[in-house]
Image: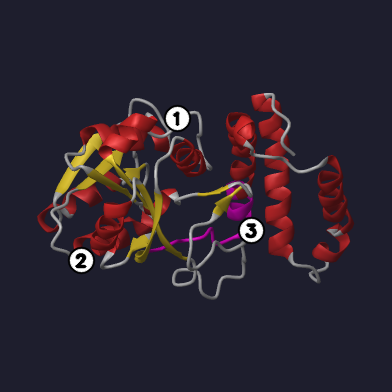
Amino acid sequence: MPMRNGGEHLEEQLAALAAQDTDVAWELVVVDNGSTDGSLEVVEGWRPHLPLLVVDASERAGINVARNRGIVEARGDLLLFCDTDDIVGPGWVGAMAAAATDADVVGGRIDEESLNTGDSVRRPRMPADDLPIGLSFLPFAVGANLAVWRDAAAELGGFCESFEIGNDDVDFSFRAQLCGMRLGYARDAVVAYRHRSDLRGMFRQFRNYGRSEPLVYARFRDAGLSRASAWAVLRRWTELVASVPTVLIGRGDRSRWVYTLAYSVGRVEGSIRHRTPYL
């Protein structure tokens, strides 16, 4: 579990991990990526209730820096990944271990309803009964609910640290499949996934997703990943501009407008940064 300022929801996740109902021998590797909010003290307080290993990865910021350090330090053969602000189900560890007997990389089921009921912000949902498809190309395991065998992770070289926020799990899953590894789905390995609670937070998140998509395209276009046509891009931007008056008076779907604008802006920024047009 990578951690950088785990925040108000950290204890909920630790409690869920402490309540795992499984006969599988496991440990929780918390990789601290430079927390300054007292998260380490919170984690240490759960040591009597968890098979805990705390690893320091504060030398360089980045969720994939932390994940890769965890891969090195963990003592198990099967590596499971979760985040500090979500909540794993009580059978998560066991279900992931069972699904991994027939796969190299496994993605669990993402529950987007339990922690987001009543939210005024509505973001697009991932499939409720299968793995999502990344950039209309291949399925991927979401990083908040992912398992990989240690030898497979080593063969892949871990998570790509060029991805700062977003699409690192897409890149990881694509690479695994394209080199012949099996990607499995663990329906019973459930993680309650927490959304951003306001439009500003959702905008930042989807802008980051958009910023990293040109890098995904640059890495996988030779494998068949395509991009939107110029006409489709023009139509999307035209609809965004034309919808402004409706959104401002509260008659349009404001959430949809915000996340579409966010990833569109992010794609422009990412295309410039990575010198790869993907709009």
Element under disc 2: loop
**Mark 1 crowd level (few <14, some 14–19, many ≥20, 10 Å Cα):** some
Q: Earlier in the sequence, mark 2 or mark 1?
A: 2
Which quarter shows the C terminus? top right
| Res 119 quadrant in image | bottom right
- 32 in relation to 12, above or below: above
Element under disc 1: loop
- Residue 34 showing in the rendered view: no
> Disc 1 marks which residue?
161
Percent across and percent down for residue 232 are 82, 48
> Disc 2 marks which residue?
19
Q: Earlier in the sequence, mark 3 or mark 1?
A: 1
Percent across and percent down for residue 261 are 73, 50
Q: Residue at x 46, y 41 (%)?
A: 177
Numbered disc total: 3
Q: Residue at x 59, y 35 (%)?
A: 216
Q: Earlier in the sequence, mark 3 or mark 2?
A: 2
> Disc 3 marks which residue?
199
> Rounded to the nearest whole Å, what is the CA distance between mark 3 and mark 2?
33 Å
Q: On the picture, is 77 further left or further right than 220?
A: left
Residue extending furthest toward the bottom: 118
Please identify, in this view, whether the residue under mark 3 or under mark 2 is nearer the observer. 2
Query: What's under tag 3, amino acid-wise?
Result: Leu
Percent across and percent down for residue 208 are 59, 42
